Image (cartoon, rainbow, N blue to C red):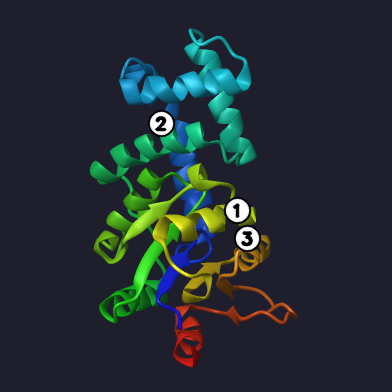
Amino acid sequence: MIRVILTDIEGTTSSISFVHDVLFPFAAEHLPGFVTDNREEPAVAEQLDAVAAKSGVDRQDVEGLVEVLQQWIREDRKETSLKALQGMVWEQGYQQGELKGHIYPDAADYLQRWHDRGLRLFVYSSGSVKAQKLIFGFTTEGDFTPFFSGYFDTRIGGKKEADSYRNILKELGVEPETMLFLSDVESELDAAEAAGMKTAWLVREGELPDTGRFVARDFSEVETLLRKR
């Protein structure tokens, strides 16, 4: 019986276009000024240290580090340091009212229903935990953070690696067959299944794939899977 739901964000609870057409451009535009203004702040300095170590750019060359970050944004790199800095920039944008997180109406509806029914809800995204809390904390439909019991990002491991899902199961202390993972990326579902989890493939647009795994257009169809289990 499924007691725990682990969900992706982009393409699953929230539109891909919001991430790529709103969040990424906002970070690209505001990141240079944010890094320059806050480079001495411990949290920012820690991430710049990591960028320098990864890229080989001199730590004192702030402009060079910013250019590396901008290139990583263009490449959609899953670097933890980039995600952390993006999260800081987005936090400022959300708090100043410049950003509102997108959430699909069906996701908003069923996340609340599942929480109220006693299911434990967790998020696993390549975006930083800070960014995850922001997108759910400042949505167009209100604050959804009270519905989640925890968040995971790439610090637990890559989303296409089975060990990442094993690490999540170990940290939560739950049996694999009691957890359902929701994602729009099949290779992530493969990794979760290799760790023993149940999965649901969210395909919100386009043709439905010819596959033996469970596919859902939205969260109302995921609900039919839950009721069977």
Number of marks? 3
**Which residue shows up at 45% across the image and 85% down it?**
223
**Which residue shows up at 62% across the image and 66% down it?**
189
Labels 2, 1: front one = 1
- Label 1 sits on a secondary structure element that is helix
**Which residue shows up at 37% across the image and 35% down it?**
89
Labels 1, 3: front one = 1
- What residue did someone put label 3 on? 188
- Label 2 sits on a secondary structure element that is helix
Q: Position of residue 115 (x, y in %)?
A: 30, 74
Residue placed furthest toward the right: 210
Q: Position of residue 120 (x, y in %)?
A: 34, 70
- Label 3 sits on a secondary structure element that is helix
Q: CA–CA distance between discs 3 and 2?
A: 31 Å
**Which residue shows up at 39% across the image and 51% down it?**
132
Residue 76: mark in rendering = none
- Relative to 134, is 54 above or below? above
The picture quadrant where one finds residue 119 is bottom left
Q: CA–CA distance between discs 2 and 1?
A: 35 Å
Q: How many residues crowd around disc 3 within 10 Å: few (fewer than 14), some, or many (20 or more)?
A: many
- What residue did someone put label 2 on? 30
**Of the image marks 3 and 2, the number of the one nearer the N terminus:** 2
Q: Amino acid at mark 3?
A: Glu
- What residue did someone put label 1 on? 163
- Relative to 99, is 30 above or below? above
Q: Amino acid at mark 2?
A: His
Q: Amino acid at mark 1?
A: Asp
Labels 3, 2: front one = 3
97 left or right of 8 in image: left
